[in-house]
Image (spheres, rainbow, N blue to C red):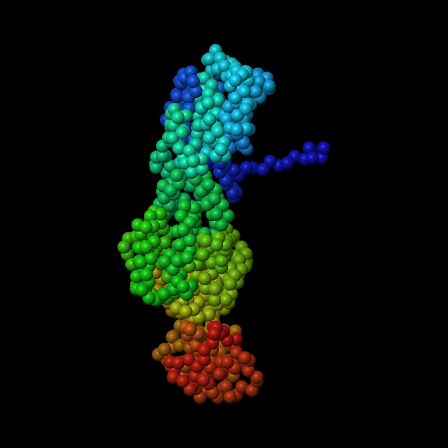
Amino acid sequence: MKINKTKDKKQQTNVYDLKDLYEGKIKNENSLILIREKEVEYDLLERGHIINKLYELVSSCCNEEKFVVALEGKWGSGKTTIINNLKRLIKNEENIIVIDNFDPWSYEDEKAMFRGMFDSIMEKIGINFSIRDINDFIKTYMNTIFNIAKHENTYNIMKKYYSDYDKSNKLKKIINAYLKNNNKKILFIIDNIERADKENIIFLFKLINNILNFDNTFYLLSFDDERMRKIFDKDLKIDFEYLKKIIQLEIKIPKVHESVMHDVVNKCIINLMSLYGIDNHKKEYEKTIRFLAKDIKDLRELKIFLNSVISFNYRLNNYLNFQDTLLLELIKSNDIELYEEIWRNKQYFVSEDTHMSSELYTLDTKGFNIKAKDYFDNLFSINNQKHREYKEILSLMFPYVENYKNNRLIKAEYGSYMIGQNNNGDYKTNIKNKRIFSARYFDLYFSQCDNEFTNINKNIEKFVRIINNTDNIEIIEKRFIDLMNLYTNWVQKYTFETLEYYLSEINENKMSILLKIINKHLKEYNDDMIFLGLSALQRMYIIMSEIIIEISREEFEEFLKVIGNDYSKIYCIRELKYWIENSKSHFKEEYSQKIEKLNIAIKKLVEDIIIKNIDILDKRYYIEKNLWGIYHETKESQNERKEYIKNILNKENIFRFLNDMLSRSVGSGYGYSVRKGNIEEFSSIDEVDNILKSIERELTEDEKLLLNIYEQSKTIPDDEHAIFLNEDKKFIV
């Protein structure tokens, strides 16, 4: 009673029919969508002419004996759909008895199949024979069919006395008379015969040919002729031409017209993309879908593709690029050797961010191009015809393959070697779209898991949604801090680099808010040395400069008031000037006005610092490299600069001074030295030595290391390093 009283909430199905997807009838929000595999009556592949001809044949055929038709086509070619449409057309034909409930693959032996086939006929025609008569019929004909040793006596007795045979033959005569007198015909449909046990298959044809050969009976046999030929020739060791003696008409299902299949594939994929919120208007998807339509041969393949690739692999792992996921899964399904070849030889497919892996990065581009061309020549050679079919698809996925296809240099043999300094639009778009040819994401397409780069992308996309949809600055700042602390080591550079690529997606009215938050946390960004690249802090200067370019004059003036009175922002302002001046954006008059105002702001800061003897090395103001900001603004006033440093330099800030005088480099290791030339731009070795000698307290470990670098640097030329470390050292001073 308790169970019956409880009403279960009806759960909305997420398994749909392909026709509903094709016609755009599915209304689904944030749910996994699956396409069911079931027998259907509708026709998406324009098989109407076959269906109509088959209907005309069945309805007009007036043969006094049996008539056997074979409907031949590969799995998924639409045989069952044609049969279902045929049944729909003849369901109102009172003179046709349709028998379609017989499944030959569901019987474990021949006797059970014989009984099942005969019972199907008895059930449909409605003649009430006694169970004894039916059993006698089956027993007699089983003995007749299997005229072997164990049945030989029975067979001979039957031949001699033939009473049982005569009784069984009466059943046939009654059935034939019933069909004739009532102007009835039997349509016996047997679908997917090749799925049955091979012994049952040959027995089935014997039954149709010799035993169940009732008058005015139309047998429609549906099978894959290629599979059937294999069963006959290889498994049964019987000439396939045996079938020709039984079958009177062969209907071979023609191939689907390419335009028809393209229409179905195109609409189904686009509609499914739309349901998942994927932008299906991108031009690159047009070629992709065209290739898919060409490669997907039937609706069964399409359903599997929609379920496996889009709904499962992409919908459940949608941190990767939609196009690349689709095409790679297509290759995986149809050419697993090529799929594994790509995985094993990533150096010929990964073309961006190659510096992230020692096996990918090379400065010998000429040597690489020779090897790569030889590799692709072999991969797409005549001997690898199957791989050649996918060259066009691979060119959509991998720029190296596209270059090879178009007879261009596979890898450019010139250009900047500044790693991570590629600010062109395509590169930014590729990172945002998580393309397979980037070293950041390549492995993920094969392992189907997350890494720090996809984690960064997801968190930045989340941050962009938050900043665009809330006016609460505290919430925005909290989310920014979460993003900033996602990776606090040198990997933070990738967080900020990716954030830069998403700036265009942030609402204009929120840009100045982001600028203020970035500026507020400037001391917290990682500034580790990056080989031929930019640190997280340097990347943030670029982001700030791009925001300054975009914000209004009023918003810029407001920001300028903040940094224009902050003594710790001297180097920051200088960097902002540099990046605005070197912006890839089209230079406008408004930019030059903003640069000029930054010039005025930094000059005023430096003048105040020198005139008022503001200790820029004090903990309140200290940020690395600020001294060099002062240096660039006082290049023509060395004496004035030195006098200022003499006034502020003391034993409390001497190690911060030495820290700013450090020359750093990264290569096989991290090199450090305090160059005499650097010190002499601000002070002198004697003055520094005197201050160091006056220190009486115990030094920290970082101070001891700085002092050691300083002392060692005195004994070597200015272009050499005093010590080398295995990791970048940030001195706490």
- The x, y position of residue 408, in whole percent, is 28, 56
Q: Quadrant of residue 272?
A: top left
**Residue 298 screen position, x and y as percent:** 41, 37
Q: Is residue 319 above or below residue 625?
A: above
- Is residue 712 shown above or below 133? below
Residue at horizontal 38 percent and vertical 64 percent from the top: 361
**Residue 606 appears in view:** no
Identify the residue at horizontal 52%, vertical 21% (top origin): 156
* Vertical side of 189 occupied by 538: above or below: below
Residue located at (31% from left, 52% from top): 381
Residue placed most toward the observer, 205 or 12: 205
User: Which residue occupies the extreme top position in the image?
Assistant: 181
Residue 158 in view (yes/no): yes
Q: Residue at x 28, y 53 (%)?
A: 406
Please identify the quadrant where the N terminus is shown: top right
Q: Nearer the viewer, residue 133 or 225?
A: 133
Spot occupied by residue 234 in the image (x, y as percentages of width and height): 42, 38
**Toward which corner of the image does residue 541 lie, by quadrant?**
bottom left
The furthest residue to the left: 407
| Image coordinates for residue 300, horizontal then vertical, percent | 44, 37
Instruction: Name the foreground residue: 475 vs 23.
Output: 23
